[in-house]
Each structure stands twice: as structure tokens, then as C-alpha cells.
């Protein structure tokens, strides 16, 4: 009988303690699903100044040690606490690097996350946890694969450990100048095309891709897309060379939170009580100052950036505003999109509500209150918004790319099958075709009810995806090389 798998998940953010995006959601919920399948899984992340310590149950100091980075010696203090689902959590404190107001965007990010990646490997000996697989996530932890492969496997404690590197978004590659190598304690032998060099710079993302034992990303379609020049962001050749060790596993969501128990909603509801969903729509309209009507409400909850397809919305917004609908936008990002939505909201206050802020409570209310969720992404590694929307009975309107293609199926009125509306080509006319299809079905109550039922009964829990991760971890553990 095989020993239970031992897994360490290394991430730069973990929900609910420190989150800025989807990576935090995955790092917060996947370990719970892995533990439910019998794995001994633990998580480590930096102890940021803004981390929510109130949610860290039984937080306690464990030990301190010194991390060497080139000429600099930095202290790392280990704290442990009990995470959700009884997953053991570790957070590494260093005030020089992490006692700041934000997570990312500093001039020394290369050194901050080199420190964290090295500390995340070294601390294992201090807590006497010997994982089979270290699961690194995104560019912030890419150097961890280098440290494990090139330095620590020479020591008995680490020699059998394997690494998995997960790409959550290939666009963000952790690219820095050549001097980042020196700051990370690595020499110029790593400044080659076969190592960390990337167009005369250094890429931490590439470090993970080259030095890990296997690579995964967050949907099957995205795993294929990133091997093409269109989606590869200069890494496509490398990814093709690793195609035998490249896996796509779609993200799940926390199944414990549903429309029946979500405390953020105006009123809880279920698939058998959709009148209460309509109540949420009315209350949302009142809250946002929109007319209380039955006109279809389309929601956009997103970072306001090009990746999310907002240039298509910009082209089509005049057409959208000419129709009998309401558009609710929530998010922050590029100034041109923030100004676009605020400007059109000023012109059409009865039709468009522009909420240029980050507000999780309002986001939950919009997911539940809207009828449709617009996500016309240029590319989308996995996407969680469309999944949250379907759980709420809000029909997604998406482009066929990445995880959107893997999670949404186009509604067919004749068969009654499908969970949303999909368009293929990245053009505004294609998006508007899908919007018009959604409105057409919305105006047919029987068909719309069937669509909502389909969406709400889809299983997006972590169960199936966690099983695939277990299989991948086991295959890595069983490798002899």
C-alpha cells in the first residue's frame, strides 16, 4: 500500500489571508480538496504587512533561520496556523521584503521573491516536513524550481523531492535585468537560452518552466494555446519542447459557498426558488440607482485590462446602449477603460452603472442579481468569473478561448442543452451576436429557465480537478529520475 502523498504548495498569495487575484483562490481551495482525498498537503506564502491575521487560527511562531542571497543575508521567521479544512499553513516573515502596503510592483520584486522561493524550500528542514512534490505557482515562485533542482537535491533531505510548476497566466513572466541573477545568488552560467535568459533579460517564469519536473496550467485548452505563437508570449517554443510534461487541469471553486448560504446576497435562493433571484436583481437595481425593470441585466466584473476583451466592449458600447438592457460594471484597471465606463454611465445613467472599485460584497450581489455575465476575453487561462456566474444562475457570454472554452457550452434551444453563449472570433460583431442570442433566449421564459437550470447544476467543485492533481503528483513521485 502506497504512503499518502505529501505535498507543499508554494504561492505568493492565498485566500482568504492574502489575495489579489485568482491565484489566491486556487491556493486557498485546492489544498482542502487534496486533503479530502487523503494527501498530507501544506501551504506556504509570504507574511505580508496587509495579511489578514484575524483569519489565521492558532497562529504561532515556529523558528527562524538565515537565507543567503548573494552578499545579502536575510532572516526568515516561520509562523504556522490552522487553515480552512484543517490544512496546515505556514507563512514566512521578513519585514525588509514584505512589510509593505502591496504584494507586487516594487523595484526589488526580483529579490523579494527570490528570497521567498529559497526560504520556501529551506524551511522544510526546520519544520521536519518532507514532501514528495513541491508545487510552485507562477513567476513569483519560479526560482524555487531552480534552487531545488540545482542546489538542494544535493542534500539527502531533499534528494527525492520533485517539483511541479503551474502557470496561472503566462502573460506575467517576471522579467528582470541580468543583475537579478546575482541578487538571487545565481551566477552567469544561468544566463543562457537553455536556462533563465529571455531576450537578454532574466525570466522567473522561464526558471519554473525549465527546471521543474513537470508543468501544468489551469485548463486543457490553455495548455494547447500557449504552445502557439499567438498565446505563448515568446515561451511557445520552450513549452512545445516540454509538451510531454505539460498538463492542463481546469480550476475548481469552493463548493461550500452557494446561493443558499452566501451571506453577501440580499436574499438566499436555490434552483427551485428563482423568484428570490429576481428579488436580488430588484434590490441591486435599487442600490445602483437603476430603474427597476425586467430588462436583461448584463454584468462585467473584471480587471479593466485588454486581456479581458474590453476593447470589444468599447467598440460595441454604443450598440449596447441602444438596446433595452442594463449594463453593470465592477472593477479597476487601465485608465482608458475606467474613463470609458464612467463617461457612458454619465450619458446613460438609466442603463449603465460604472463601479470603478474593488468590492467583494458588491461583486457577490452582482453575480446573483444579474441575468448575464459578459467575459469576451482575448485569452483566459481558466477564468473563475464565468464559474461564479453559472453557480448563481447567471448566463455567461464568453469568447471560445482557454478555460472559457472548457467550462461553458453554447445553449441550443432545440435540444435544451448548454450553459451560456459563446462566440469564436475576437471581433465586436461576434460578441454582439452572442449578446443578441442571449437576449433572444431571455425573452423566452421557458427556454431561459432551462438554461439557468443547466448552469446551476454544473459541477465546478474541486473534486475532479483535485483527482487529476493527485494522479500527476503520484506520477512524479514514482519517477526514478
Image (spheres, rainbow, N blue to C red):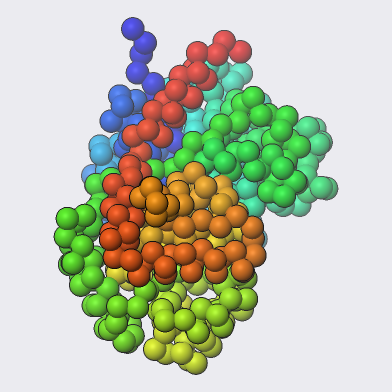
Residue sitting at 60 percent across and 55 percent down? 424
Residue sitting at 33 percent across and 42 percent down? 459
Outermost residue, top side: 1
The reply to whether residue 88 is visible in this rendering is: no
Q: Can you say whether 112 is above or below 192 in the image?
A: below
Residue 291's spot in the image, x, y percent?
31, 87
Q: Can you say whether 473 is above or below 103 in the image?
A: above
The reply to whether residue 264 is visible in this rendering is: yes
Left or right, 270 with reference to 310: left
Exactly how many numbered labels are in the figure?
0
Outermost residue, front side: 414
**Nearest the camera: 125 or 481?**
481
**Nearest the camera: 358 or 305?**
305
Left or right, 86 with reference to 379: left
Residue 107's spot in the image, x, y percent?
65, 60
**Nearest the camera: 415 or 223?**
415
Residue sitting at 25 percent across and 37 percent down? 86
Residue sitting at 71 percent across and 33 percent down? 240
Q: Quadrant of the C terminus?
A: top right
Amino acid at each position: 500500500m502506497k504512503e499518502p502523498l505529501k505535498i507543499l504548495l508554494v504561492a505568493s498569495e492565498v485566500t482568504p489571508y492574502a489575495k489579489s487575484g485568482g491565484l489566491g483562490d486556487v491556493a486557498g481551495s485546492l489544498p482542502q480538496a487534496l486533503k479530502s482525498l487523503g494527501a498530507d498537503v501544506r501551504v506556504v506564502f509570504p507574511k505580508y504587512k496587509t495579511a489578514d491575521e484575524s483569519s489565521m487560527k492558532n497562529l504561532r511562531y515556529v523558528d527562524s533561520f538565515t537565507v543567503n542571497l548573494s552578499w545579502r543575508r536575510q532572516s526568515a521567521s516561520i509562523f504556522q496556523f490552522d487553515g480552512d479544512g484543517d490544512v496546515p499553513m505556514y507563512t514566512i516573515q521578513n519585514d525588509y521584503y514584505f512589510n509593505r502596503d502591496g504584494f507586487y510592483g516594487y523595484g526589488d520584486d526580483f529579490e523579494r521573491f527570490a528570497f521567498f522561493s529559497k526560504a520556501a524550500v529551506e524551511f522544510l528542514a526546520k519544520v521536519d516536513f518532507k514532501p514528495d512534490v513541491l508545487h510552485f505557482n507562477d513567476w513569483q515562485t519560479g526560482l524555487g524550481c531552480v534552487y531545488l533542482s540545482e542546489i538542494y537535491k544535493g542534500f539527502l533531505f531533499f534528494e527525492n523531492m520533485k517539483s511541479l510548476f503551474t502557470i496561472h497566466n503566462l502573460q506575467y513572466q517576471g522579467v528582470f535585468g541580468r543583475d537579478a541573477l546575482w541578487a538571487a545568488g545565481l551566477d552567469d552560467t544561468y544566463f543562457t537560452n537553455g536556462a533563465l535568459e529571455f531576450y537578454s533579460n532574466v525570466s522567473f517564469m522561464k526558471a519554473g518552466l525549465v527546471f521543474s519536473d513537470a508543468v501544468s496550467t489551469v485548463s486543457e485548452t490553455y495548455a494547447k494555446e500557449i504552445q502557439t505563437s499567438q498565446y505563448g508570449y515568446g515561451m511557445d517554443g520552450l513549452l512545445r519542447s516540454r509538451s510531454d510534461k505539460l498538463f492542463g487541469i481546469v480550476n475548481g471553486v469552493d463548493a461550500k459557498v452557494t446561493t443558499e448560504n452566501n451571506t453577501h446576497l440580499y436574499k438566499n435562493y436555490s434552483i427551485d426558488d428563482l423568484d428570490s433571484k429576481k428579488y436580488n436583481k430588484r434590490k441591486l437595481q435599487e442600490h445602483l440607482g437603476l430603474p427597476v425593470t425586467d430588462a436583461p441585466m448584463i454584468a462585467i466584473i473584471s480587471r479593466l485590462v485588454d486581456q479581458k476583451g474590453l476593447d470589444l466592449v468599447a467598440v460595441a458600447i454604443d450598440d449596447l446602449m441602444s438596446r433595452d438592457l442594463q449594463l453593470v460594471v465592477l472593477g479597476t484597471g487601465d485608465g482608458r477603460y475606467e474613463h470609458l465606463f464612467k463617461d457612458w454611465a454619465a450619458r446613460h445613467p438609466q442603463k449603465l452603472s460604472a463601479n470603478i472599485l474593488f468590492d467583494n460584497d458588491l461583486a457577490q450581489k452582482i453575480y446573483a442579481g444579474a441575468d448575464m455575465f459578459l467575459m469576451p476575453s482575448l485569452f483566459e487561462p481558466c477564468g473563475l468569473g464565468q464559474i461564479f456566474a453559472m453557480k448563481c444562475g447567471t448566463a455567461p457570454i464568453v469568447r471560445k478561448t482557454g478555460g472559457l472554452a472548457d467550462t461553458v457550452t453554447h445553449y441550443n434551444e432545440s435540444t435544451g442543452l448548454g450553459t451560456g453563449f459563446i462566440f469564436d472570433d475576437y471581433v465586436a460583431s461576434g460578441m454582439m451576436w452572442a449578446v443578441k442570442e442571449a437576449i433572444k433566449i431571455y425573452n423566452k421564459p421557458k427556454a431561459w429557465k432551462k438554461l439557468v437550470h443547466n448552469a446551476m447544476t454544473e459541477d465546478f467543485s474541486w473534486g475532479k480537478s483535485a483527482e487529476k492533481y493527485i494522479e500527476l503528483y503520484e506520477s512524479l513521485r514514482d519517477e526514478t529520475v
